[in-house]
Amino acid sequence: MSEQLVGVIGAGSFGTAVSNILAKNVNVLLYARNTETIAEIKKTRTCAGQKLSDRVEVTNNLSDLPQNCNVLFPMVPSASFREMVLNLAPHLRPYHMMIHGTKGLHLELPEKKAPDFVLNKSNLYTMSELIRKETVVVRVGCMAGPNLASELSMGHPAATVIASPFNEVISKGKSLLRSENFQVYGNADLRGVELCGILKNIIAIGSGILSGLGLGENSRGLLVSRGLVEMIYLGKALGGEISSFVGLAGIGDLVATTTSTSSRNYTLGHKIGKGASLQEALGEMEETAEGVNTIRIIKQLADSQGLKPLITETLFKILEGEMTAEQGVNYLMRYQGNIDINFL
Ligand SMILES: NC(=O)C1=CN([C@@H]2O[C@H](COP(=O)(O)OP(=O)(O)OC[C@H]3O[C@@H](n4cnc5c(N)ncnc54)[C@H](O)[C@@H]3O)[C@@H](O)[C@H]2O)C=CC1
Ligand SMILES: O=C(CO)COP(=O)(O)O
């Protein structure tokens, strides 16, 4: 077991970018589940379109990671996170530390719903909560912020937040990730920071729709501002702290993702704004757009709990084909603007 070998799970865009950042400080063992991916990496030393550092070794044996590394960085989409955690669980020990980068939610419903069952926030798990629920690992954290993988891979200046209730997770994350062009901030509000990364994807889809419709920058300013208010409204309802939303993982990531054609959520929205259906837009994309699942989950929660997230509900209707993108914008514009900021 080496302190100097760190594990990354998931050889997609983000897992690859994070592996290269870590490799500036330590040796990295990257898990890819597909044997073709492993063969391709070994042949070309590239992964997800990014050149891999010589300090990154690859494996497709998941248990190699917990056997050889104390610290693990799971970077897989939320849709397969639980399956990955269940496969990993028998190999994990309480001394392991896990810092994930997944910006999505897991919805867990009871196998048999009681007649009076009402969905509530305890049915929604962030990825750190899934790790805690399904494994013996205690020291968990997340990595969130404006971290578009394509820009990280170019080495442009950027920063992230390591959130954890454990100081040692934050300091470990800092020492492993900090490099010349990559700053690392800490935050004790793990749920709040996870929610920032999860909820901003909703607004990124909305922003992509506006640009697909060609509606200009005033409308984007309006959406981003009201979107942040909605993120805070939902974030508070789900147990996050307001302060996290005005930090790097909140506003910081919201700005990056609502303005960049590198964002998959923005790109998906753009296609829909141009007239594609959700199925058509998804069919044209190879990578994960977490916001679609998040919108569906938040809509279910809102319906059960009497919450009114206006933007999310409108986007839900657009994605489901119940409204066109133009109708969605018209609907939102009929809303009577009231108090600008009522949460501080
Ligand atoms: N790409 C980006 O710029 C950023 C992505 N993220 C988050 O990172 C997560 C992953 O995103 P990307 O890497 O961009 O997605 P991606 O679609 O590029 O790649 C996902 C990778 O995960 C692998 N994978 C899926 N299930 C797996 C499993 N059970 N075990 C091992 N590997 C598995 C897939 O084979 C694929 O290589 C998402 O939740 C996303 O929100 C966060 C920050 C930035
Ligand atoms: O979260 C991200 C950047 O911080 C990446 O956003 P997308 O998943 O929309 O590409």
Image (cartoon, helix red, strand yellow):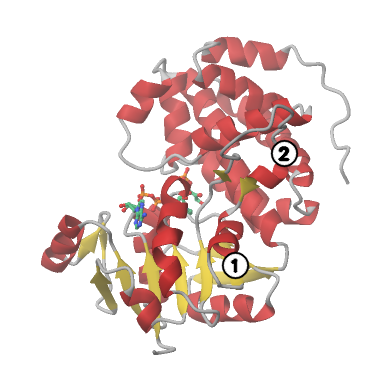
Q: Is residue 159 visible?
A: yes
- x and y percent of residue 180 in the render? 48, 76
Q: Residues within 10 Å of mark 1 (few under 14, many from 20)?
A: many
Q: Nearer the viewer, mark 2 or mark 1?
A: 2
Q: Is residue 154 visible?
A: no
| Residue 21: mark in rendering | none
Task: In this rendered view, identify the residue nearer to me: 270 or 218.
Answer: 270
Q: Secondary structure at mark 2?
A: loop
Q: Is residue 12 above or below residue 68?
A: above
Read off the residue under disc 2: 120
Q: Is residue 214 above or below residue 290?
A: above
Residue at figure coordinates x 33%, y 72% from the top left: 63
| Residue 123 falls in image quadrant | top right
Q: Secondary structure at mark 1?
A: strand
Task: In this rendered view, identify the residue nearer to me: 218 or 105.
Answer: 105
Tag 1: amino acid:
Gly
Read off the residue under disc 1: 141
- x and y percent of residue 56 in the render? 29, 75
Q: Earlier in the sequence, mark 2 or mark 1?
A: 2
- x and y percent of residue 28 in the render? 34, 77
Tag 2: amino acid:
Asn
Q: CA distance from mark 2 to mark 1?
A: 23 Å
Residue at figure coordinates x 64%, y 81% from the top left: 168
- x and y percent of residue 177 in the render? 49, 75
Residue at figure coordinates x 79%, y 45% from the top left: 236
Q: Residues within 10 Å of mark 2 (few under 14, many from 20)?
A: some
| Residue 48 falls in image quadrant | bottom left
